[in-house]
Structure formats: C-alpha cells, structure tokens
Image (tube, helix red, strand yellow):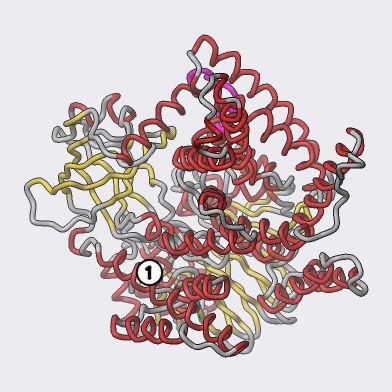
Amino acid sequence: MRTAILGFAAGAAWLQMQADLPEWPVIAFGMLLALAGCWLRDGWLRTALVFAAGLLLGFGWAAMQARGALADQLDKADEGRDITLVGTIANLPFRFSDGVRFNFAVERVVGADVHVPANLSLAWYANWRGAVTEAGEASRQPADSMTGIAAGSAFGEVQPGERWQLAVRLQRPHGNANPYGFDYEVWLLEQGLRATGYVRPSAANRRLDSFVLSFGHVVERCRAVLRDRIQRALAGKEYAGVIVALVVGDQRGIPQSDWKVFNRTGIGHLISISGLHITMVAGLFSLAVSALWRRSFFTSWQLPLILPAQKVAALTGASVALLYVLLAGFGVPAQRTLYMLAVVAIALWLDRIACVSYVLCAALGVVVLLDPWAVLWPGFWLSFGAVAVILYATVGRTVVRATKDAPLPRHRRLWEALRLGANTQYAVTMGLVPLSMLLFAQVSLVSPLANAVAIPLVSLVVTPMSLVGSVLPMSLAVPVLGLAHFIVQLLAACLHWFSGLPFAVWAAPTPPFWLFCWALFGTVWMLAPRGWPVRWLGLATWIPLLAATPTHPREGAMRVTAFDVGQGMALLIETSGHRLLYDTGPLYSDVSNGGNRVILPYLGARGIVTLDGMIVTHSDSDHSGGALAVLAAMPVDWLLSSLPPEHAIVRAARQHHHCTAGQHWDWDGVRFEMLHPLQVSYADATLKPNARGCTLKITAGGKSLLLAADIEAPQEAALLQRAAAGLGADVLLAPHHGSGTSSTPAFLLAVHPRLAVFQVGYRNRYHHPKPEVYARYAALGIQRLRTDESGAVTLDFDGGVQAAAFRSLQPRYWYGR
C-alpha cells in the first residue's frame, strides 16, 4: 500500500513536468496496465511493479484532472470584451489600497452568446481602473467616468456568498515566466480560476442577493465575519494580520517586510494555520471531551460503558480539526494534518493499530488524489518532509520509560520531555537543510533558537487566545486579542534581533537535483540511529551544497537575462567577474514591483548577493519601479541614471552619476559604451523622461548588444547623426517596447541586428509592440522574441550569440501556446 501511494504521488509529479498532456487512449491504457500490475506477487519484483503501477495511476489521474481543468477556457476572441455576468462571491475577498480582489462563481452571462469559465479571479478598483497584468496586479490608469454603484463605496463591500451582476473585462490565464519565479498560471489552474479580469464602471453593477446558501458560502462568510471582528478589535495594530492568519489562514494582510523576518528566522510555518496548531487545538478538545466523557459529564449516565472514551476523543479531535482546516482555507499542511488525524481516528474506531508510516502515506495519497498540483509547491514538500524526518529520527528510538515499580520523578519527566523536544527540533532543522536549499537557496542558521522561543508562544499561547478572542463578545474580544497581539509584538522584536544577526541565514545557489540527492543521502546517514558507523560523515555531503558559488561566463564572454516583468524593462548583464542590472521592471502596486517579485527571487536563487552596478534609464515606473526594492535588499556599488538629484532612487544609492554619452568601461574583456543622452540634455526642462533614456552598447567577443531604453524617433535621428558608425549590433532591445514612436527604418538599418527582443506585457494597454513596427522588423529579416510569448530571454555572447526562451526551455502543458 505504501509503495503504491508513493508511486501515485511520483506519477502526479511526473505529469506536472510534461509539455503536453497525453491523449485519452494513452491515459486509459496506462491506468489499465497499472491495475493489472498490482495482481503480480513475486517479492522485490512485485514491489517494483506495484510502485510502477502507482506511478502510472498517478500520472493518469493527474492527466485526467488537468484535461478537465483546461477544458473550461475563455476564447481568445473574447479577451478584452465588456461582458455582463451574474454570479456569487466565492471566497474571502482581499482589500488593498485601490480596491478589492475576489473569486467570482459565474451563474450566467447576460445579453451575450459568450462562453465564460465557471470561476474567475476579479479585481474591483476604486477611482482607478486596471488592466490585469501577468503578475495578477493592476497597471494603474485614470478611471473612466464612474457610474452609480460602480465607483462608489460599494466596491469594497462585497462579502462571500453575495450574488452580484457585474460588467467585467476578462483575459485568459497568463503569468510572468522567469527562472526560479512564481508560476501564476499553474496556481490559477490549481485554484480552478480559468480567467482573470476586472470590474468595469457600469450602471449594471449591482448586488442581487445578500446571501446565497451553500456549504462553501457558509464557510467563507464565517471566515469573513471572524476576520472583520479581529480587524475591528485590533484596528491600527501592526500585527493584526498575523492574528488573522492564525485564526482564518488569510496571510494576505501580512506585509513583505514581516515575511522577510519570519523566513530569515525559520518560523514562517507558524504564521498560519499549520499542522502544529491544528494538532494542538484538536488535542486540547480531545482531552477535554475525554475527561468529561470519563466522568459522564458529572452525571450518573456511565457513558464509557456505552462508548469508550478513546473513541469519543478521536472523533472529537478529527471533527475539530476539520472545522479548523475549513477556516484555514484548506492549505496543504492543514490537509495533511487533517487526513493523518482522520486515519488515526478511523483505525481507533475499527480497533486497528495505525502504523505511523501508513498514516503519513495515507495522508499523502489523499492530498495528491484531491489536488494533483499540490506537488508543485514548497509547502507540500516541507510539510510531508518535516513529518517524515520526525518519524525517521524518533520512532523506535530508545527512550527512558517509567515502570510500575519505579515511576519517573517529576523533574525527570520534565527533563525527558525537554530532551525529546530538543531532539525533534534538531532532527527537523538538520533534516530539512537539503530541501530548504533546493526550494529557497538558503537555510536559517538561527531557526533552532527562534523556533525554541516561537513554538511555545505561538502554539500554546497566541493561537488559543486568538481563537477564543475571535468568538467572544467585542467587550471581551478587545482585551483578549489585544493581549495576544502584545505577545506577538514582543515575539516580533525578538525575531527582528535574530534576523539582524550577521549569520542569520546561509545562502548559496539553488543546487542541481543530483547534488540535492547526494546531500539528502548524507542527511539520512547522519540522522540514523546510534551505532550506525561514522554518522558525522553525513555532514561532508553538505559541503558542495553550502559552499557553491554562482555560475558566471568565462573571461571575455557575457550572459544577458531579459526578464519577463510584464510591461516594463529589466535585464541582468553578467561577465566573468561583474554584474550589472539595466532597469528594474515596473511598479505593480504599493507593495509589489519588478524588483521584489522577479529580480530579487532570481538573484537569490542564483546565489547573487551583490551587484556591481545598476542603470535606471529614466523615471517612468515601468523602468524604475523595482529599483528601491533592489537597493534596499542588497549592496549596489554604483548607480547610473537620468533621474534628478532629488529622486528617491538617487538618494538611496551609494554612489550616483548621470548617464552621459561618452562614458565607457571594460569588465573582464567586455566593453560597455554609453551612447545617449548628451550632458547638455539635463539642462533642457522641456524634454520628456523618454528622451533621456540611457542607451548602452555592450560588446563581447566581437558581438554586440544595444540597449535602447525608451528613446523615440528624435533621439534615434540624433544618434544616427553623431554616432551612426557605432550603432551596429547583433542584438537590439527594441526601443520603447516596439512603440509606434520608435524603431524608425533608418535606425533599424543602421543597427542591422540579427535578433530583436521586445519586453512587453501580455495584452498591455499600449498595444506594444505596434503591429506595423513589429512587421517592420520582420520585413528586414530580423528574428523577433517577445517576453509576453517566450517568457524571460537568455542571451549568451560567447564566440556567437545564442538565444533561449524560458517557455521553450521549460515547456509546461498549462502554458497557452
């Protein structure tokens, strides 16, 4: 059974690596073959065949689920149309500074013959309208004239279970595609959201029913009520979002700055409804009900003679866990705990002995059966990995036990409990090092100390107080929740101190899979029982894992990564010993930008902790939006820009200079030349920011790259007049994203590139690149790559020019091609 379940999970994971889904006959044949293999009985051969059978079943099951999910699709011709829908608010809405975001369950389309997917992700903006970008954020635009309820206060008043009529614009699922980046498209697929969009200002927008009864709506409305009560009781409090996360599992109110501290100290697993919290709450209720049942609730009923107290306790624990998991939004760690408790409860009711490995495998099988995409997320591997490590390192190990003749004294029992807790924390900390490096390219060195403080406080004090306070009358809820918040404040202060220690985190590049497996083998060796030979040698397998350094091109060569940041520009240029960031992507929202959403995760996964230089070509937010985030996160030696001295980015830089034509430098055999703007342009107040875009030419091994920022036709003409002979390049970053005001025929003929890269957003509101400009490149025989179709583009200048598109290098079946 365990072998088959492990194979089933492996098969589901295998399917998620595929570029295309198998056809139905292939799926059916594979599943029938798997069932036939289960009947063989021949020792180790049977074990191998059972695993293979589980593998095929998991692969086929995941393929069936994927085909069903992808079938509900918005037609491309219907993207960007105004469509009026009737449906219900299907989840807990998230309110942000400009509006509210929620899932919408479509019931019918009003007045149009259009197929709309059953579940949508919508944003409703106040005073602004947004074109939803790949990252799921909105690009801000001045609002249309608002009509009636659409522009008023009602946008923030949507509640789960309400039925609304809404005028919307939709698009098919699309996300930024970058190495080591978050895959928004598969996340939407897992959530069953087959289109995204925003609510249009319209007189048709109105609430039709205050509540539509269904089980899901009841659960989500309860979550909304509890969240609102907590937010009212803790109005203006810094860590109210943490209390909300502990009660209803909604982590969206916790700012990124706090998450950075939690992750650096290794206690992020506690700031949610984790398995530890669910087990603790279920255990408390089980103990209470068991004690009352044994005493027949202080009556003469003699209830234990009717039903054993152990079975009542198991039923109570599983029921409470189910209730809490529903409040949590059914995350993977919560599911794992619920299914494990349910298996134990069932075994107890059936008078069966539940082996812990069977319990864990049963939970694994149910999670993958219900959600084959769960294997794609770090939480899945961390949750099951942590429990597996604990079982491996503790179950069956020798412990000191009391006997009837020699009971342990109280101080000895306390010591043994502390020793067991310390051993468990040691096992989890050491056991998850290879997995943490694979998933996050870092491991917290202060995690054992931080968890020693945080686990008792959060699990035994803050979480119970938060749960109780959220259901008390407001007169009592305010002091109870206030005390819980005060404890979180004290804990946060301690965590900030831990996080600020010089060696709080060990970072290294994301290891290749073979190196992860080698380190995992060493970890298993190290955590083996006493008596296992030279266990300490397991540490040696970590050396190549932790001591790795970022890869780099050879001397005289260059690598350029043009990130997929939506409608914006950001490129990383690497030589053998230096790194330069050219622009930093757009500003998506007040808390989200190309820096913290795309660039920093990539640099972290590569193990890059410093930059030698940064160029911010001009002040437009699609080029400068992520600069402050990058400057705050890592040292940057110098900044070149066309920004005014009082600009926040200039003030944040260690060393700043204006970019000026004539500047040049050499790094590791690679030549960098600034071609534009002229120094005199900074005295001309009439120039637009685009006109001073820092234009850079880079030459490596006789091959050149021209980065033309957002210069337009007048600047192209000026470059032709003063530097036409130096414009030639093998690769051109299309000026102004392929705007109709740039890429003049004369300029393209002078540059004469073999390849042009267009950094543009999917269905951006500017319609970049303009069709006539895009066709102009084709007419000149220039190969074209656009990031909205290809994802991030990697260019290797090493004797020649090799271009690679991320969506082609790592194709997945959910990418619309």
Pointer 1 local density, CA inside 10 Å: few below 14, some 14–19, many at least 20: many
Q: Give the main secondary structure of the magenta stretch.
A: loop
Which quadrant is home to the C terminus?
bottom left
Secondary structure at badge 1 equals: loop
* Residue 234 within the segment the image draws in magenta: yes
The kind of residue on which mark 1 rests is Trp
Q: How many marks?
A: 1
- x, y percentage for residue 690? 45, 53
The residue that disc 1 covers is 814
The quadrant holding residue 44 is bottom right
801 with respect to 356 (left or right): left
Query: Is 751 above or below relative to 471?
Result: below
Direction from residue 554 to residue 680 in the image, left or right: left
Q: Position of residue 669 (x, y in %)?
A: 73, 79
- In the rendered image, residue 689, in percent from the top left (x then y), is placed at 47, 49
The residue positioned farthest toward the top in the image shown: 475
The reply, left or right, for residue 508 in relation to residue 791 is right
Q: Nearer the viewer, residue 52 or 612?
A: 52
Residue at 31% in and 40% down: 215
Q: Residue at x 73, y 65 (%)?
A: 434
Q: Nearer the viewer, residue 443 or 219?
A: 219
Between residue 773 and residue 683, name the one nearer to us: 773
Q: Position of residue 557 (x, y in %)?
A: 68, 81
Q: Quadrant of residue 212?
A: top left
**In magenta segment, residue 758:** no
> In terms of depth relative to the viewer, which is nearer, 322 or 262?
322
In magenta, the rendered stretch is 232-241
